[in-house]
Amino acid sequence: MRKPSKPRWGLAPIFILLIALAAGGYYFWGLAPQTAAATEAPLQTARVRKGDISILITGSGKLVAAARVELGFRTGGTVVGVPVRVGQTVAEGDTLAVLDDSLARLTLAEKELALQSLISPDALISADIARINAQTSLDNAISELQYLISPAVYRAEQNLLEAQRSLDDKKAANASADEIAAAESALSRAESALKTAQYTYNAEYVPVTFLTSYRDETTREIIETIIPPTGDTIGLARAKVQAAQLSLEDARQYYTRLSGDTEPCADLTTYGTLTSKLTSACLAVQSAQLALENSRLTAPTSGTVTMLNAAAGQSVGTSPVVAIASDEMFIQFYLEETDLAFVQSEMPVRVVFDAYPEEVFEGIVTRVDPELALVSNVNYVSAWATVDLPVEKTFLSGMSAEVEVVSGEALSTLLIPVQALRELAPGSYAVFVLQEDGTLQFTPVTIGLRDFATVEILDGLTGGEVVSTGVVETK
């Protein structure tokens, strides 16, 4: 009986081992060159070229009138005429609406009649008489004061006032040092003269002028005594002189306004009762004229009527009844806060209106508001621009538009990809220029405009040179 035979494993393990070694060797030697090549990735380059670059900031806004005014009457009344309509173009001074002015005309006639009574030929004669009487009153007041303080003291006081006034005038006029010194010397002499006059007044004038006598009731003797004027008496006399001077000036000015070549109401300065009465009459006439003018509503500027809330026969108050928008139009547009550094006055803009989506209109930024504008609870930079609007097209206030601000633009300039730029320090840059022998040369450059893909080169490179932008990244 045969025994079962055992499995034959003798040569099989050796054969399998040889196959594994061969496969491993093939894998190792086959992949080794590929790994080495991957460590030497090819260099990416770009040629310095000429082209255009623009820095554009976009926003949205609306077309608005440069000015819009709402107009109403200063006083209420009944409208008797409205010669304009909404949408009509008006010029400065054109009549927009008219109130019944019969009462205003009557009031003006009454005030003019009152004024005529003050400037008539009879009034001129009365003014001349008042001027003469005022001069007489002043002369009398001065005579009374001179009697009380002596003519010498009065003249010395007047000289002192005149010297002080002269010095003040020279100082106010920035006169020379010699002129001011002379005026100060004159003032000093006037002060000394007044002291001398006052001494003479007390020593000589008072004993002679104010010597009086009376009989003693007991002894029946005649007694002489000196009773000088009191301070109150002298003060009252001085006040009378001042009042008389004011009255004379008032009468002179009144007479001059009536008899002069200019209109009596040209000068409304008041000096006293007479000129005050004339001025009041002139102001009353002017007020009545203004009330009459206010019954007619006129355009303060040229523009287009955008609102009209008045009709003939309608009673109105002082609320606005007409609105005018100026013909000059602006674009008010809004930008993100992060764009603030890229917009300023005089920058060009390109505007596309929703109403004319196929056309681009050119303009200029006129101003950037100093405060942020809150729109839908979000802060935006608010800016304004003028736009060249053709007259053959219709443009309405409030039209929506997209605005593109040309923050910077360079035409036919040297450009490289932004990947080629190396920042050394803030504001300092360099690139690697590929040489003919394949080496890279470190080259500092000065840049200009820059967007997300391209950089303008102002200095350091020439057209046609090749710069490195990095290496091809492999996985």
Image: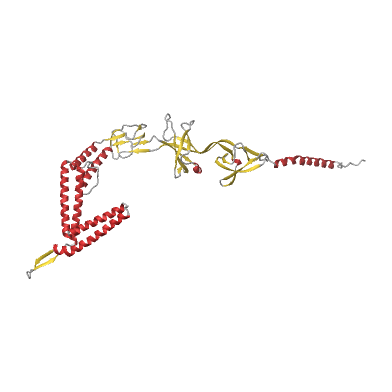
Where residue 134 sits: x, y (%)? Answer: 17, 50
Residue 305 visible in the shown view? no
Picture quarter containing residue 107?
top left
Where residue 139 sits: x, y (%)? Answer: 16, 53
Quarter of the picture containing the C terminus is top right
Q: Nearer the viewer, residue 367 or 446?
A: 446
Note whether 161 is above or below 257 in the view shown. Answer: below
Quarter of the picture containing the N terminus is top right
Give the side of residue 417 with respect to residue 378, left or right: right
Where residue 141 sits: x, y (%)? Answer: 16, 55
Give the side of residue 163 with respect to residue 432, left or right: left
Picture quarter containing residue 303?
top left
Q: Nearer the viewer, residue 67 or 49?
A: 49
Picture quarter containing residue 453?
top right
Where residue 332 sits: x, y (%)? Answer: 44, 38
Outermost residue to the bottom = 219
Outermost residue to the front = 178
Outermost residue to the right = 1
Give the side of residue 301 with respect to residue 232, left or right: right
Give the side of residue 415 with respect to residue 331, left or right: right
Q: Nearer the viewer, residue 121 or 285?
A: 121
Outermost residue to the top = 392
Q: Residue at x 24, y 55 (%)?
A: 162
